[in-house]
Amino acid sequence: MTLKAVHHVQVTYPVEMESAILFFYSQVLGLTEIPRPEVVKNNSGAWYKLGDIELHVSRENNANNQASRRHIGFAVDDLKAFEQHLKAHGVEIIPDQIPLPGCDRFFLRDPGGNRIEIAQFINDSPVKLTTDESSFYRPSAVAR
């Protein structure tokens, strides 16, 4: 028994951000909305698909996404052009505070406060962290 793939990721938003967040994912990011199963099709939010992975966007009472570092990472083929596209839609760009070798990136928050990473990988290869670099990101590796 093994895990085969990531099927979907869910992000949430407070009720007052519903129109803005649905516009953001469909129009600003250009994701393709997909039909939802009958049992949830009347629920708030929407489901999108990018490649083989689905993104489920759902309303959540008391969502506190602004306080979290969790994020979705999207790869692009032209980081500068995508940054300009986002800025044209009024999206605030958050500069990368921890540059990774082989990767140019920045961050942003969607209208629901979810953190998003936008990255361009040099030579189309994902970054492979060394043991020392990867321990920096693991909370268990932080000295107490």
Image: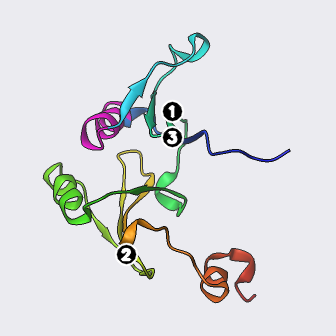
Cα–Cα gap, marks 3 and 1: 5 Å
- Point out the tag, 3 or 1, that comes first from the N-terminus: 3
At x 37%, y 75%, the residue is 96
Cα–Cα gap, marks 2 and 3: 23 Å
Where residue 72 appears, x then y in whole percent? 49, 54
- Dot 1: element: strand
- Point out the tag, 2 or 3, that comes first from the N-terminus: 3
Answer left or right for 47 relative to 96.
right
Say above or below: 96 vs 6. below
The quarter of the picture where the N terminus appears is top right
- Asked whether the residues under the numbered discs 3 and 1 touch, taking CB atoms below 8 Å apart as contact, a structural biologist would say yes
Q: Which color scheme did the rendering employ for the protein?
A: rainbow
Range shown magenta: 18-30
Where residue 120 appears, x then y in whole percent? 35, 66
Residue 18's disc number: none
At x 18%, y 57%, the residue is 87
Q: Which residue is mark 3?
A: 12
Q: Which residue is mark 1?
A: 58
Residue found at the far front of this picture: 123
Q: Amino acid at mark 1?
A: Ser
| Neighbourhood count class around disc 2 (C-alpha, 10 Å): few under 14, some 14–19, many 20 upward | some
- Dot 2: element: loop
Image-quadrant location for residue 7: top right
Where residue 42 appears, x then y in whole percent? 50, 13
Q: Which residue is mark 2?
A: 96
Q: Amino acid at mark 3?
A: Thr
